[in-house]
């Protein structure tokens, strides 16, 4: 095990960082759940934005639960565009189900474990398209999930 100058092993530093990241995600989920339950649109958006900023600042990877709650917060505020943008930013995939290049606003600072690409985040993405009335994109997303190409 490598030792840092302070005598702390790199494995314990990594474990400590992982623990801090997990605490951040847990606290973020609690905040998002609280504000989603309230009927205050601007606070939901601010909380979701702040969670994204905190995750990027800490270089944490989003998990599926937190990502789904962020997308849900944006969708419940009728801000489906931001939900789709978040999906695209995290996975680097076009949120409309196409093979279009994605322009990342945060230069790859917002990432998620591939396990976050699950039925719940896809459902949030489909809801975003439904809110926008963009059913063609929703069908392309479903087709992409099934492995079909256009």
Image (cartoon, helix red, strand yellow):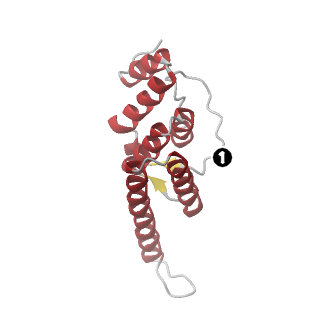
Of 43 and 97, nearer the camera is: 43
Residue at (44, 32) in percent of width and height: 125
| Relative to 12, 49 lies left or right | right
Residue at (38, 25) in percent of width and height: 145
- Relative to 128, residue 148 above or below: above
The quadrant in which residue 24 appears is bottom left
Of 101 and 70, nearer the camera is: 70
| Relative to 2, 120 lies left or right | left
Residue at (45, 39) in percent of width and height: 76
- Relative to 108, residue 5 above or below: below
Mark 1, secondary structure of its residue: loop
Of 14 and 63, nearer the camera is: 63
| Residue that carries the numbered disc 1 in the rendered image | 107
Q: Percent position (x, y) of residue 117?
A: 40, 39
Q: Quadrant of the N terminus?
A: bottom left
Q: Percent position (x, y) of residue 96?
A: 52, 24
Q: Residue furthest left?
A: 119
Mark 1: give few (<14), some (14-19) or many (20+) Cα within 10 Å: few
Q: Percent position (x, y) of residue 127?
A: 42, 29
């Amino acid at each position: 095990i490598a030792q840092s100058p302070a005598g702390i092993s790199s494995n314990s530093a990594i474990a400590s960082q992982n623990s801090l990241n997990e605490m951040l995600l847990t606290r973020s989920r609690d905040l998002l759940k609280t504000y989603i339950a309230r009927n205050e649109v601007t606070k939901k958006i601010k909380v979701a934005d702040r969670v994204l900023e905190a995750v990027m600042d800490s270089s944490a990877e989003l998990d599926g639960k937190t990502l789904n709650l962020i997308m849900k917060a944006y969708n419940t505020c009728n801000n489906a565009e931001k939900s789709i943008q978040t999906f695209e930013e995290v996975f680097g995939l076009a949120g409309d189900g196409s093979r279009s290049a994605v322009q990342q606003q945060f230069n790859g600072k917002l990432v998620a474990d591939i396990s976050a690409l699950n039925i719940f985040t896809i459902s949030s993405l489909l809801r975003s398209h439904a809110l926008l009335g963009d059913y063609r994109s929703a069908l392309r997303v479903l087709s992409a999930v099934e492995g079909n190409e256009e």
